[in-house]
Image (cartoon, rainbow, N blue to C red):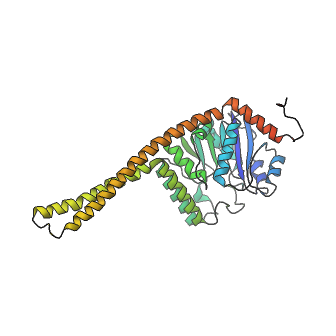
Amino acid sequence: MKLFIQIPCLNEEQTLPLVLKKIPKAIPGVDDIELMIVDDGCSDNTVEVARRLGVRHVVHHAKPMGLARAFRDGVDYALKHGADIVVNTDGDNQYPSEMIGELAQPVIRGEAEIVVGDRQTPKIKEFSMFKRLMQRFGSWVVNKAAGTHIPDAASGFRAYSRTALMQLNIVTEFSYCMETIIQAGNKRLAITSYAITTNPKTRESRLFTNIFEHMAKSGGAIVRSFLMFKAHVIFLWSTVIFGILGLFPFVRYLAYLVEGESRGHIQSLLAGTTLLTCALISLALLIISEVQRIQRKLVEDELERTKEIMYSKPYQKIWEQERADSARPIDEPSSSTV
């Protein structure tokens, strides 16, 4: 079993040695541990520091692409090189590297496909009361959308099985954290959490400038992920609600008509007609969303089959050869050169 430890980095030359220092050299149930950083457009010596400290795998971005893209490209690289498990941690040393083995154990034992490190946010001294409440509320919203019970949905300290990564498709540009939980929940992947402690804060977050920006971007990611899987629920309820509300004015008008007092109550017909029109529009959108949901599932099934081929062992040899060729000096001939 091969485990890749993935570390997205943006100018982390100061903190990366702290992250790598406590990474376990051996993990029960794992045969091979590979270290990888995702250079998200670093302008300092992060890559040089990583290579000096023994990191063999580096994914390069010419400019900062964001955490979601860094995660997605890192996962793609890990799967191409035979990863059975991918553990994601941060380059700012927020998460305890020494607990990677414990975090990955439920995946190793086959008890879960995804394990999320629970930072126990009420105990984090650096978090204000407002931030703790928002973290708790955000996790509650994500769990409602996903049908899960993850106490710290925003945590980036996670272990993923190969099976889970083959089924997850990152489409957001901000952060993958919320999206992957919602996708995993709706795809019935086994997901659990593991309590951890965090290290002292080393710097401010580079994902956002303040808590309100984080809330806005996270909220947008949650809404998009929810609509991807459950847009039909919204249109179903809007059809029912508008339909019921639209019937009341007609019933009211008919009551007056029976009593011979229908004159002057034409407004009831207009209001009922408007509400029933909204119900019909919602019904049409419900049908469209159902068709799109079925189409999305078919596309995802096809994409998963494509991934199975692209990340299979014959292709892994090709990706490994490409990596070796890219690392070889230009004037040195490739082993495949005739």
Residue 305, percent across and down?
58, 34
State the residue in front, 103 or 270: 270
Residue 148, percent across and down?
49, 47
- The residue at the far bottom in this view is 264
Q: What's the residue at 64%, 47% (across, down)?
A: 72
Question: Vertical placement of 299 versus 64: above or below?
Answer: above
Q: What's the residue at 62%, 59% (across, down)?
A: 124
State the residue in front, 212 or 291: 291
Q: What's the residue at 14%, 61% (across, down)?
A: 255
Residue 197 visible in the snapshot: no
Q: Which quadrant of the structure image shows residue 215? A: bottom right
Quarter of the figure that contains the C terminus:
top right
Quarter of the figure that contains the N terminus:
top right
The answer to whether 191 appears left or right of 7 in the picture is left
Residue 142, percent across and down?
51, 53
Q: What's the residue at 73%, 31% (across, down)?
A: 317
Residue 163 visible in the snapshot: yes
- The residue at the far right in this view is 331
State the residue in front, 258 or 35: 258
Residue 145, percent across and down?
47, 51
Q: Give the number of marks.
A: 0
